[in-house]
Image (cartoon, rainbow, N blue to C red):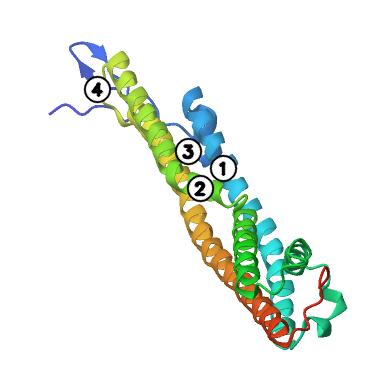
Amino acid sequence: MTAFPVGAHAQVGGTSAAAPSLPTDLSVWGMFVQADWVVKLVMIGLVLASLVTWTVLVAKHLELARQRESAEQFRDKLAATQSLAQLDPAFADHPIVIQAREEIAQSAGSLDDREGLKERLVSRLDRHEAKVARKMTQGVTILGTIGATAPFVGLFGTVWGIMNSFIGIAEQQTTNLAVVAPGIAEALLATALGLVAAIPAVVIYNHFARAIAAHRAVVADSAAALLRVVSRDLSRGTLPEGKV
């Protein structure tokens, strides 16, 4: 039995078939650098989407926390108010008070129609509540878009990377792991980045959806409290015309 020397290449039909060496850099950055330009664009887009998600989280959290605290203070003060004349001057310029003031001013001379005034106030305050909800959702809807599309964008990068792997197999006419592995690794990296972008976006979007619903409920409670105060003044006949 003949022994082959260590390190010698196997001979197939008289031809040396040396296997190509595996890539030495299979880190995330290394795979990004070696990736096809289409896969690179996909990865860059997903990283940017992830940055947008975390930026919206910080900015919107601060905004909602500030608005929620102010709205709760106003609701509690208004709930304890028996008459518009007793309303804390610090809240005289609150948007809900302004809406009521404008409607009472426009209804001057017809305050005897109590039900009509109440109906008009309800309409105004409902529109104000809807306006607040629209403002609060600004910047949040993009999170839903990222959460819905990022996995498919990552999947596109995956399909493209695997396609390039098959092209490499066909060109080199070998299924050696050194040829197949880099393309598949790049493809899977695109999938991973898609999930990294999508999962936090969905979680944060759901969190803000609940927070905005809670804030809208506080605004609705404030509007209802103001309507009760106006109703009391109408019943007493002490509602001042033209101002609140």
Which residue is more in the foreground, 158 or 127?
127
In this rendering, the answer to whether 217 lies above or below 1 is: below
* Circle 4 crowding by C-alpha within 10 Å: few under 14, some 14–19, many from 20: few
Rendered residue at 65%/69% (across/down): 117
Rendered residue at 82%/85% (across/down): 86
Asked whether the residues under the numbered discs 4 and 2 touch, taking CB atoms below 8 Å apart as contact, a structural biologist would say: no
Could you tell me residue 211's position as x and y percent? 57, 67
Residue 87 as seen in the image, left or right of residue 204: right
User: What residue did someone put label 2 on?
Assistant: 197
Residue 70: in sight, yes or no?
yes
User: What residue did someone put label 3 on?
Assistant: 26
Dot 3: element: loop
Asked whether the residues under the numbered discs 2 and 1 touch, taking CB atoms below 8 Å apart as contact, a structural biologist would say: yes
Nearer the observer, disc 1 or disc 4?
1
Dot 1: element: helix
User: Which amino acid, by three-letter code, is at mark 3?
Assistant: Leu
* Circle 1 crowding by C-alpha within 10 Å: few under 14, some 14–19, many from 20: many
- The mark that comes first in sequence, 4 or 3, is 4
User: What residue did someone put label 4 on?
Assistant: 10
User: Which amino acid, by three-letter code, is at mark 1?
Assistant: Ala
Distance from disc 4 to disc 2, alpha carbons, whole Å, reads 47 Å
The quadrant where residue 188 appears: top left
Could you tell me residue 163's position as x and y percent? 33, 24
Distance from disc 4 to disc 3, alpha carbons, whole Å, reads 28 Å
Which residue is more in the foreground, 171 or 8?
171
* Circle 2 crowding by C-alpha within 10 Å: few under 14, some 14–19, many from 20: many
Rendered residue at 65%/54% (across/down): 135
**Disc marking residue 49:** 1
